[in-house]
Image: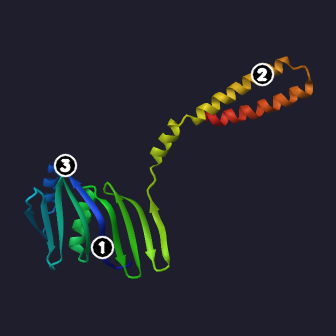
Amino acid sequence: MAQRLATEYVNAILTLSEVQMDQFLRAAEDPLVHSRIKVLDNGGHEIVLEDAAGEEVHLPFDRKKGMYVCELTCRLVNQPLTNMIRKLFVRFKGEGIVNRVYYGFTMIYTYHQGSVRRIVEKTDSGCKLVYEYKNTLQELQHKFLTRDVEREIIRAYDEINRLLDLRIRTRDHERIGEIDQRLRTLSAALFTLEA
């Protein structure tokens, strides 16, 4: 298995309410990572997390519209601090890009609301999509709500009724055969649409 060299947070954003900020501070307590909190003049906080090896990360939370917003760009190497930030980022629904750097390639993770939405493998030869989230339920709901199928069903019924009226009035057997063929085609299409 490849050894991770570093983890990079690129324009990552955490947005926390007052209650979530308290939960965040409690969640940042860990025997392997020491935390310090600085209260800033504007009501924001700067949380500094440091591991036993001396690697540290500064998390500046600015107050914006009653929320604490942290815009984070950093590079982490040591495992305890990397794990701590990853857990906090996921738990508190972080947004942004996280690069996991390995020798010879980088895995680029795109997060939305704390969930991985896309993974791309980047090498010297290019990029390859590894994973992409698809909201199948939402797509199905959208299709269900789309009225195009219902309109097609209504058009098919109208056409069938018109052809049946025409068939009743027609005396030419060849023309009746054409109408019957068209009716068979429409009923098969209607069966498919209604399924």
Q: Amino acid at mark 3?
A: Lys
The residue furthest front is 42
Q: Name the N-terminal-most of marks 2 and 1.
A: 1
Q: Nearest to the eye among marks 3 and 2: give it.
A: 3
Q: Is residue 84 left or right of residue 176?
A: left
Q: Is residue 150 left or right of residue 79?
A: right
Q: Circle 1 sits in a helix, a strand or a loop, which is it?
A: strand
Query: Residue 136, percent across and down?
Result: 47, 48
CA–CA distance between discs 2 and 1? 70 Å
In this orientation, which residue lies closer to the viewer: 134 or 9? Answer: 9
Kindly identify the residue that appears in the image at 87 percent across and 26 percent down: 176
Do the residues bearing badges 3 and 1 touch, measured as CB atoms within 8 Å? no
Kindly identify the residue that appears in the image at 44 percent across and 74 percent down: 122
How many numbered circles does the render carry? Answer: 3
Q: Is residue 15 left or right of residue 111?
A: left
Kindly identify the residue that appears in the image at 44 percent across and 68 percent down: 120
In this orientation, which residue lies closer to the viewer: 136 or 161? Answer: 161
Q: Amino acid at mark 1?
A: Thr
Q: Circle 3 sits in a helix, a strand or a loop, which is it?
A: loop
**How packed is label 2: few (under 14 Cα within 10 Å), some, or many (20 or more)?**
some
Instruction: Residue 29: tell me if it is visible.
Output: no
Per the image, the residue denoted by label 1 is: 7
* The C terminus, quarter of image: top right
Per the image, the residue denoted by label 2 is: 164
Q: Nearest to the eye among marks 3 and 1: give it.
A: 3
**How packed is label 3: few (under 14 Cα within 10 Å), some, or many (20 or more)?**
few
Q: Name the N-terminal-most of marks 3 and 2.
A: 3
Kindly identify the residue that appears in the image at 76 percent across and 35 percent down: 185
Per the image, the residue denoted by label 3 is: 65
